[in-house]
Amino acid sequence: MLGRFQARSTADDPAVVARRAERQAVAEARNVRLAEREAERAAQAALRLAEDAEMRAEQARQDEAAAAEATQRAAEAALAAETRIADQKAARDARYAARKARQRG
């Protein structure tokens, strides 16, 4: 048993140091890859959020334009209604004046 124990590598053994360094390099490379993947995911999420915000802004612009158009149409309809009412009143007044003129005459 003592022979097996003494035959074991020590921490100072170059092979042990090399294996430890290799394991550490592999772990660091794995951590770098994981960090790169996480950064890529974060960039994609930020891009999706930006696209979503842009779509919402475009929708808001379209809604605003539609509302402005509806307001314009409503104003035009109100003006047309006012004009029609004024024309009807003028026609009524003309008929009334004609009737009065016939009664006098």
Image: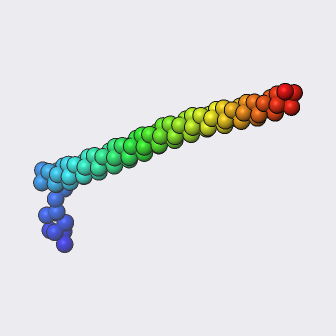
62 left or right of 26 in image: right
At horizontal 12% and vertical 54% (from top left) the residue drawn is 15
Front one among 77 and 5: 77
> Which quadrant is home to the C terminus?
top right
Q: Compared to 16, does 48 lie above or below?
A: above
Residue 51 at x, y percent in the picture = 39, 43
Residue 58 visible here: yes
Q: Nearer the viewer, residue 15 or 46?
A: 46
Q: Could you tell me which residue is drawn at 67 percent across and 35 percent down?
A: 84
Classify residue 79 as left or right of residue 39.
right
Above or below 14: residue 86: above
Q: Name the residue at 63% across, 35% down.
A: 80
Residue 12 point in image, percent of width and height: 18, 50
For the N terminus, which image quadrant? bottom left
- Percent x, y of residue 101: 82, 28
- In depth, the one of 104 and 74 nearer the eye is 104
What residue is at 16 percent from the left and 69 percent from the top? 4
**In the image, farthest residue toward the front:** 105
